[in-house]
Structures are given as structure tokens and as C-alpha cells.
Image (tube, rainbow, N blue to C red):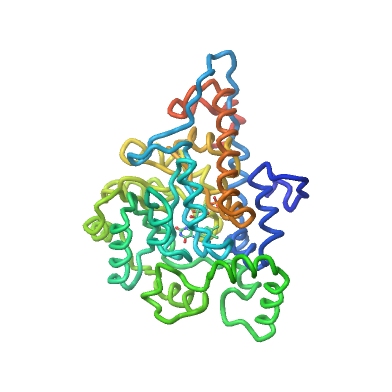
């Protein structure tokens, strides 16, 4: 991450998303911090998500009347206070007590959607009950179609307006940090002891989250793995459930079961985006899973323009990966997204300060967005397009 100094000292109060990362690093057991912070293989794509967005330059335009500025957008028939949604983050509830509920409440108060992951700790019903407007629901298509159907039914029953089908997990990319921390595989006794010591050295996390938050079960999967009382038991079930035989034809099956808006997440290629539009989805998320799946694929900032060009008129294009500031949000919108999802930023914020942290993190993004709108000469987010980006001809990066 060349754009930000990692692990830099914090003075008195968090001012940026990266300050929340630092606070989370101090608060969480190492294995959990690495689980959030890490990516697949050499983490090249994960780093490129951040670095490539850093290379995109905004075009400063002055002396326009920008006294009124509207950062809101309409996406999938819903008004977002800013073009940001909280991405699905599996195991969120291990980062803070009932973290998905805390984050969903922060998102609702702020006016942006929260996307509940299939592999959340809090079940969809608990999150929906805690807020006035139900969360979006993210689904992995599983081998056990009956169970997937049951999950779709549960999301429908609580009134989720949007189903996000994640399609870039036909197989799971190797995350070496998790292997080194003995989070995957069959750890030796010694590795288990080291893991235990890592946890034991974080008493505040034990008190607040492990005891106070009861993060031992995956709330949406309890029925599938009855009686399981350890994250490992769930993990082996989940890993056996990713289905590499899923194709575009399966979208019709989901469509039939789902009355609301349908979004597919994990598209990087314009040809795939056209297939998604043909399959009848309402939106796509241009995403490489935060660099956690196939390493060496392009960053989202690099992939987004061609995808938006291909299908931007047909479906709502969202994007995620590497967004760390409100300026990044504006850049992604200028590159063709209607809105972005942020994953690690909310995970760090909730780990550091719970609901208040997530709310503040969103405020920080909003303040950045407001400045960027004013100084690119735009009065509203709806006006932002490629003209908000600086281009110096031959020297311009190929975005
Ligand atoms: C710890 C963690 C867990 C994740 N779990 C899920 C998940 O359960 N479902 C999913 O579709 N994406 C998952 N993602 C990917 C995010 O939804 C999102 O695509 C990614 O985090 C965006 O990149 P960013 O973290 O740089 O914002 C996860 C990401 C992280 C960091």
C-alpha cells in the first residue's frame, strides 16, 4: 500500500479510514486483523485496488457556483445519502459485538444500504429487526440448492429490497495470511496454542466480543450445520458448498425465486457484464472481491471504465475495491460507477468503535465527497462524469 503509510501512529482521534485500520490493528487478535486486512496470494491485486485509484487524478475546476452541493444518488430505485453501501463482509460479528447489527444501524441512520453477508454472524432476521429498512442480502449460490432457496426465502420474508449474488467464488482463492495464522487447514497442536495465545493477549476483545457478542455461529447457516459450535465446523461446511458448476443459466432460477432487485457481484470483464445484462439482472458490482480471490487480475479502477461503457445504459453499475476516501468515491463515479461498496473500511471502523465508528467513517467519506464536488465544479453527484478526471493526453494512465 504505497498510498498510505501502514501502521502509522495515531494521535488523539481517528480522522481517516486508515486511522480506523490502525485502531482495529491494536484492538483485534492478529488472526482476525489479518483475516480482514489480507488478500489472496501475493496480494498484488489487493494493493493495486488502492494504488490504481491513487493514480487517478481529479480535474480541478474553479469559479463555478457550487454553493449548493448534493452528494446523494439514486441506485436500484433507492436514494443513497452518498454513493456508498457497506459491502458484505463474512464473519463481521467476530470483529465487534453483534457487529452486523451495529453497522446496519449506522448505515441506516446515515442513509446508505448495508449488505448482509451469507456468512454473517448475526442472522438476517436479527439485523432486519434492529433497523427500520431491511438490509440487502448477499448470497453465494451453494451446491445445496434447497438451502440456497431457503436463504432467499428468508431474505424475502424480512423484506430485503436487493439480493446480491456473489459470482466470483466458484473456488476460494488462497489467502496465505490465514494459512500462516492457522485459520485454515488442519492446524497442529502448537499452532492451536499460538492461536489461543494471540486471543488471550486481547482481553478487551474477549470480554466485549467473544463473551459479549457470542460470535460462535453463523446466523444464516445454523440450520445447515445444526449443533455446530465452532467457526471451523461452519467453515468446512461453507467451503464444501461453493459451487463451480454455476453458470449464467442459473440466474433464471434465482430470478424466479426473487421478486426484488437482483445484482451480481464479481464481474470484471465487459463480456461477462453483457452476459449479466442479458440474463436480466438489475445491477452488477465490478469487483475482484477486494483482491481476495484471483490475484493478478486488474484493479477495479482499471476494469471499471470498459464495463461501464459496455452495460452502463442497461444496468446499474456499482464497484468496489480499494476505496479509502471520499475522493476515491468520486473517482469511481467518474470512472463509470453509480455507487461504490466499501468492505474493509466498515470492518475496521466497527472493530475500532462499533456503530459510532461506522457512522463517523461515513461522515468522513461524505466530507471528502463534498470537497471534491466543490473543487471539480460539480453541484451534485449526478453531474459527475469522466469530465471530473484530469487527463494530460499521452501521459494519462489508461483508465
Ligand atoms: C473480511 C472480508 C470478508 C468478506 N466477505 C465477503 C462475503 O461474505 N461475501 C462477499 O460477497 N464478499 C465478501 N467480501 C468482499 C467485499 O464484499 C468487497 O468486495 C471488498 O471488501 C471490497 O474491497 P475493499 O475491502 O477494499 O473495500 C469480504 C471482504 C473482506 C475484507
Q: Give the left or right position of residue 82, taking residue 178 as reference.
A: left
Res 392 quadrant in image: top right
Q: Is residue 45 visible?
A: no
Q: Nearer the viewer, residue 288 or 225?
A: 225
Q: Nearer the viewer, residue 305 or 342?
A: 342
Q: Is residue 243 above or below residue 67?
A: below
Q: Give the left or right position of residue 304, taking residue 47 as reference.
A: left
Q: Is residue 375 visible?
A: yes
Res 241 quadrant in image: bottom left
Q: Nearer the viewer, residue 387 or 237?
A: 237
The residue lying at 59 percent from left, 16 percent from top is 62
Q: Give the left or right position of residue 176, taking residue 256 as reference.
A: right
The residue lying at 59 percent from left, 43 percent from top is 360
The residue lying at 50 percent from left, 24 percent from top is 69
Position of residue 48 measured from the top left corner of the image (x, y, whole percent) = 60, 49
Position of residue 168 measured from the top left corner of the image (x, y, whole percent) = 43, 59
- Total numbered badges shown on the rendered structure: 0
The residue lying at 58 percent from left, 19 percent from top is 61
Q: Nearer the viewer, residue 311 or 383?
A: 383
Position of residue 213 measured from the top left corner of the image (x, y, whole percent) = 55, 67
Q: Is residue 67 above or below residue 217?
A: above
Q: Is residue 63 above or below residue 373?
A: above
Position of residue 9 measured from the top left corner of the image (x, y, whole percent) = 78, 50
> Which residue extends farthest bottom?
189
Q: Give the left or right position of residue 217, taking residue 254 as reference.
A: right
Amino acid at each position: 500500500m504505497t498510498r498510505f503509510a501502514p501502521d502509522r501512529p495515531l494521535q488523539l482521534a481517528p480522522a481517516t479510514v486508515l486511522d480506523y485500520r490502525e485502531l482495529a490493528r491494536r484492538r483485534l487478535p492478529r488472526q482476525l486483523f489479518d483475516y480482514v486486512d489480507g488478500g489472496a496470494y501475493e496480494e498484488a491485486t489487493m494493493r493495486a485496488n488502492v494504488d490504481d485509484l491513487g493514480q487517478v487524478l481529479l480535474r480541478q475546476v474553479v469559479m463555478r457556483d457550487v454553493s449548493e452541493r448534493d452528494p446523494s444518488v439514486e441506485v436500484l430505485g433507492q436514494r443513497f445519502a452518498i454513493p456508498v453501501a457497506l459491502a458484505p463482509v463474512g464473519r463481521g460479528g467476530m470483529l465487534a459485538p453483534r457487529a452486523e447489527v451495529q453497522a446496519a444501524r449506522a448505515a441506516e441512520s446515515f442513509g446508505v444500504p448495508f449488505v448482509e453477508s451469507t456468512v454473517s454472524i448475526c442472522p438476517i432476521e436479527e439485523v432486519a429487526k434492529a433497523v427500520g429498512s431491511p438490509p440487502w442480502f448477499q448470497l453465494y449460490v451453494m451446491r445445496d440448492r434447497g438451502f440456497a432457496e431457503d436463504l432467499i426465502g428468508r431474505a424475502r420474508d424480512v423484506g430485503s429490497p436487493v439480493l446480491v449474488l456473489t459470482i466470483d467464488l466458484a473456488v476460494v482463492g488462497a489467502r496465505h495470511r490465514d494459512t500462516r495464522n492457522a485459520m485454515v487447514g488442519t492446524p497442529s497442536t502448537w499452532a492451536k496454542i499460538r492461536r489461543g495465545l494471540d486471543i488471550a493477549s486481547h482481553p478487551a476483545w474477549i470480554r466485549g466480543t467473544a463473551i459479549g457478542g457470542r460470535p460462535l455461529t453463523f446466523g444464516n447457516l445454523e440450520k445447515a450445520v445444526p449443533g455446530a459450535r465452532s467457526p471451523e465446523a461452519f467453515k468446512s461446511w461453507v467451503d464444501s458448498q461453493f459451487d463451480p458448476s454455476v453458470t449464467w443459466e442459473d440466474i433464471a432460477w434465482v430470478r424466479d425465486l426473487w421478486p426484488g432487485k437482483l445484482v451480481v457481484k464479481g464481474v470484471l470483464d465487459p463480456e461477462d457484464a453483457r452476459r449479466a445484462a442479458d440474463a436480466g439482472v438489475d445491477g452488477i458490482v465490478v469487483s475482484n472481491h477486494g483482491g481476495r480471490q484471483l490475484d493478478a487480475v486488474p484493479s477495479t479502477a482499471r476494469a471499471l471504465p470498459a464495463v461501464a461503457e459496455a452495460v452502463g445504459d442497461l444496468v446499474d453499475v456499482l464497484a468496489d475495491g480499494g476505496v479509502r476516501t471520499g475522493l476515491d468515491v468520486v473517482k469511481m463515479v467518474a470512472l463509470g460507477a453509480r455507487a461504490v461498496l466499501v468492505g474493509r473500511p466498515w470492518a475496521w471502523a466497527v472493530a475500532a468503535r462499533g456503530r459510532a465508528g461506522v457512522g463517523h467513517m461515513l461522515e468522513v467519506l461524505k466530507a471528502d465527497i463534498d470537497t471534491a464536488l466543490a473543487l471539480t465544479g460539480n453541484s451534485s453527484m449526478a453531474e459527475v462524469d469522466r469530465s471530473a478526471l484530469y487527463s494530460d493526453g499521452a501521459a494519462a494512465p489508461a483508465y
